[in-house]
Image (cartoon, rainbow, N blue to C red):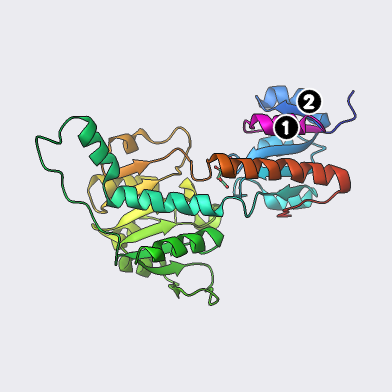
Amino acid sequence: MSSRPGILTIDPILPFMKERLEQFFDLHPYTSLEELKVVAPVIRGITTGGGSGVPAAIMNALPNLEVVSVNGVGTDRIDLQEAKRRNIRVATTQGTLTDDVADMAVVLMMTVMRDVVNNDRFVRAGNWPNSPLPLSHSLTKKKVGIAGFGHIGQAIAKRVSAFGMEVAYFNSHAKPETAYRFEPNLKALAEWCDVLILAVSGGPRSANMINDDVLTCLGKNGVLINIARGTVVDEEALLVALKEKRIAGAGLDVFQNEPNINPAFFALPNTVLQAHQASATVETRTAMGNLVVENLIAYFTDGKLLTPVI
Ligand code: 8YV
């Protein structure tokens, strides 16, 4: 039997990560709980994505698990309390993806407000010579409400301010060190803003935070952007609001039940859909991948994580 630690890879990893990890560890890609049973005793570490986390059934199946290295910043799919109880350490790639995720929020906002996707389809269909396009909407002077004002929320604020947009934010507590207005009431923020951008962490505290009431406050001219987690939005309520044009549109990078999202989204012309791509650039995924690997090497070399959560 190998003396090298066994690492379970839950999400697929990039080739350079595999190459580096294989210098130190025996890798076991996750296939099924049944097959996991065979290798379970040798697994001491996990790599996973923020969206996948570590399902309870997997954590429970691994008696010798010591460390989880997340390729992302979200820990909402990991039972941190149980990890703490079992003395399992958890690291994320904090600090690597803030700018790209903030960029995606802005890309989605602009794409929805300026009708980029519909206009592209119109041009490709050869319709330009035949009929005028509907007018789109300015960003300048519009109000942006940001729900969740951590690193990503603040990076979004900085970007949209540069477009001459007004910003206010909702958060668990005020951040007086920032230049922006704190709005402690989410419905009041939705009522005030033209664009509501979700940048909160996932998990039980934010689950279905965007419900029918909040969407009603956002109103028929309002746009919803979600680069946070699908769980933050009551999707049934959102689908109805979009279908009945009770809000103007949505730009969504994340969904409940990814990647098998509700097909009702496919038929909505006022919605721009992404496949959880906010951090998916060569540059950021390289930085994330390096940190995932180096956290594991650091842990198994001297017991210390570089970017620990617990
Ligand atoms: C990644 C994420 O797409 O950081 C997170 O929590 O959800 C995203 O950045 C994901 O972790 C990639 O696996």
- Counting from the top left corner in percent of width and height, residue 178 is at 52, 73
Quadrant in which residue 287 is drawn: top right
Compared across the picture, whether 87 is left or right of 2 comes to left
Rendered residue at 53%/68% (across/down): 172
Can residue 54 be seen here?
Answer: no
Q: Mark 1 sits on what residue?
A: 8
Quadrant where the N terminus lies?
top right
- The answer to whether marks 2 and 1 mark residues whose Cβ atoms lie closer than 8 Å is yes
- Specify start and end residues of the magenta stretch as a single range: 6-24
Q: Secondary structure at mark 1?
A: strand
Q: Residue 142's spot in the image, x, y percent?
A: 30, 65
Left/right of residue 277 with respect to residue 70 in the rendered view: left
Measured as percent of width and height from the top left, residue 227 is found at: 46, 50
Where on the image, by quarter, is ligand 1?
top right
Q: Quadrant location of residue 197?
A: bottom left
Number of marks: 2
For marks 2 and 1, the one nearer the N-term is 1
112 left or right of 14 in image: left
Residue type at mark 1 is: Leu
